[in-house]
Image: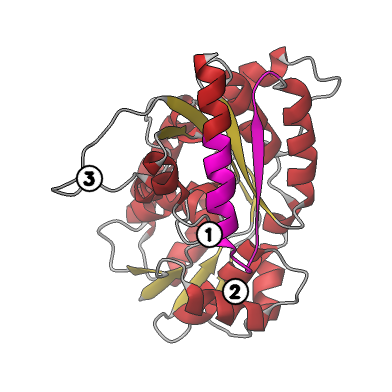
Amino acid sequence: MRLGIPRGYFYYDYYLFIETLFHDSETELVFGEPNNEEIMQSGIALTVDEACLPIKLMAGQVSSLINDCDIILIPRIMKDLAGRWLCPKLLGLPELMTSAVVSDKIYVTEPVHFNNKNRTRECFWKLCRKTGMKRTRFNNAFEKAFGRIADVYAGRNNMHVEASWEFIPEEPGPDEILLPNTVNVLLAGHCYNIYDKFTNFNIMKKLDTLGIGAMTEGSVPHSEMEICIKKSGLIKEPFWEAFVRILGTALYMRDKVDGILYLSSFSCGLDAMIIEMLKSRVSDLPIMVVKIDEHRGEAGLDTRLEAFADLLEKRRVS
């Protein structure tokens, strides 16, 4: 059995869970190729113009896996381990993908609430039973998988997800000199934007070339994010998972970075709210917002990053 895992959305948050669940099983995991121009153009052809770039890339990913897999997994993940709701696009992701790519190979799980361990177990058992996995073997694998992702949330494992290692800048070549970064920024946004090199033009390497170190939410325990949100003085407790994760990380990092670089998908309504909240709650730091879409104007991005680097350096020495 070959199980396809598209490289988009849930991949960056739940890769660790899925890989552990099927580790050493008879099911072969087939991960989508890193996003590229061909996958993007395929996704553009399958979706409406108004869809954001991550939706288009996800559709392209699903389409690219059709001929190589027996099943393509699209989990309907509703809540994270803290019981907060994922954004509306993720809640409706199965419908978006099954309407864009018509295939009986697409498998949609029942609603997954990661804050309910027993319910999560039964949702994934139905998938694993379909692949031929035995119940005893599944129970053991599920406990390991759930334990690993719980460790990430609790801060016992600093590695956000295995996929985040794609984000590490390349090693210097034989004739290059590795200089220490003089300033640091928080690279904020949804995980599928900050961890995808194609989506963000390998922005980690661009920042490193400019002498800027980048920090992400991956090094912040979820419990610390929650504490920062509770101390922020919001009149109402937020229920969106992304809101807590992004704003909580920014509040936690505000004394550890010189600025914030926010990667935002064009037409993302949730980002519009989060960005305004960042501006009001972290007003002491420069914030640069980069809008991401399929038009991919890399030259303009380079110019803006250079200007932002100059601003951060001037603030540092003043």
Q: Relative to 286, is 176 above or below?
A: below
Range drawn in magenta:
284-309
Residue 137 visible in image: yes
Residue 233 x/y as whole percent: 79, 14
- Residue beneath the point at 65% across and 28% down: 286
- Distance (Cα) linking label 1 and label 2: 14 Å
Q: What residue sits right under mark 1 in the picture?
A: 199
- Residue beneath the point at 59% across and 65% down: 296
Is 20 magenta? The answer is no
The circle drawn on residue 172 is 3
Q: Earlier in the sequence, mark 1 or mark 2?
A: 2
Residue 194 x/y as whole percent: 52, 47
The quadrant of the image that shows the C terminus is top right
Q: Relative to 239, is 66 above or below?
A: below
Along the viewing direction, whichever of 236 and 26 lies nearer the viewer: 236
The circle drawn on residue 59 is 2
Q: Relative to 63, is 167 above or below?
A: above
Along the viewing direction, whichever of 50 and 140 lies nearer the viewer: 50
Q: Amino acid at mark 3?
A: Pro
- Distance (Cα) linking label 2 and label 3: 35 Å
